[in-house]
Amino acid sequence: MLLVVGLGNPGGEYAESRHNIGFMAVDAIAGRHSLGHFRSKFHGKIAEGRVAARKVALLKPMTYMNDCGRSVAAAAGFFDIPAGDVVVFHDEIDLAAGKIRVKRGGGHAGHNGLRDIHAHLGPDYRRVRLGVGHPGHKELVTGHVLNRFAKADRDWVESLLAAVAEEFPLLVEGDDSSYMSRVVQAAPAPGPESAEGNGRQDGL
């Protein structure tokens, strides 16, 4: 079984913010692949189904970003899922807006959600990094990620989420390279003027 986690913060004030692009990705996947209705469990919202002949559980932790590892660990423990079969979708300010990267293992780069998952599962899970750009200065990062996407971002965000969901079976099958390539082909990142920089991940 594959546990697919989308990171974000609960509550209407955070809906469609850059920090919640993980939630948005998981919602898009659930809709595209008819994975059922989300129900409350494991300190979060979870939906289950099959994709590419494999059982898949989608999880949106409702514990806020810096405590999301508790939700992920609860679900992984219940289903007896090893860290290598956990995939986490999250925002990444180290990537220009609209870029995508898939990696296995590694550090948390100061992202509080990943930091907490590390504390509960260790570093060996897979993560899908969805670029939201950097505002250019460290002191602007919090407002940048907690604010909603601008209207000018709507087209690339919708295209990226649609591609992330459409090509999801490749990720389920473990073909991370083809998944990235197909998403990039279907949803090219916006031009440099929309990329909002490529700075550091500053503890969010």
Image (cartoon, rainbow, N blue to C red):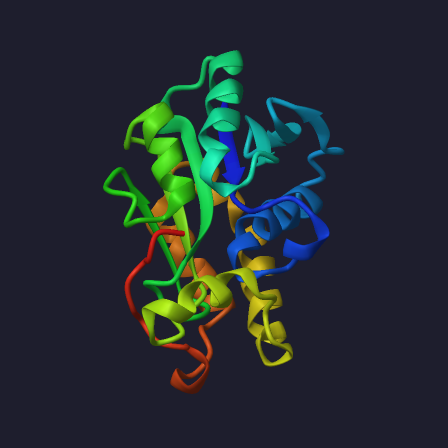
Q: Is residue 133 visible?
A: no
105 to the left or right of 167: left
Furthest-right residue in view?
37
For residue 54, above or below residue 10? above
Furthest-left residue in view?
106
Residue 46, percent across and down? 65, 29
Numbered-mark total = 0
Furthest-front residue in view?
139
Q: Residue at x 52, y 15 (%)?
A: 79
Q: Residue at x 50, y 42 (%)?
A: 65
27 to the left or right of 88: right
Q: Is residue 143 visible?
A: yes
Q: Residue at x 31, y 71 (%)?
A: 198
Observer-nearest of 163 and 39: 39
Q: Residue at x 58, y 58 (%)?
A: 161
Residue 100, percent across and down? 40, 59
Residue 151, percent across and down? 64, 78
Observer-nearest of 132 and 172: 132
Q: Quadrant of residue 142?
A: bottom left
103 to the left or right of 42: left
For residue 61, above or below residue 192? above
Residue 203, percent across and down? 35, 52
Observer-nearest of 11 and 28: 11
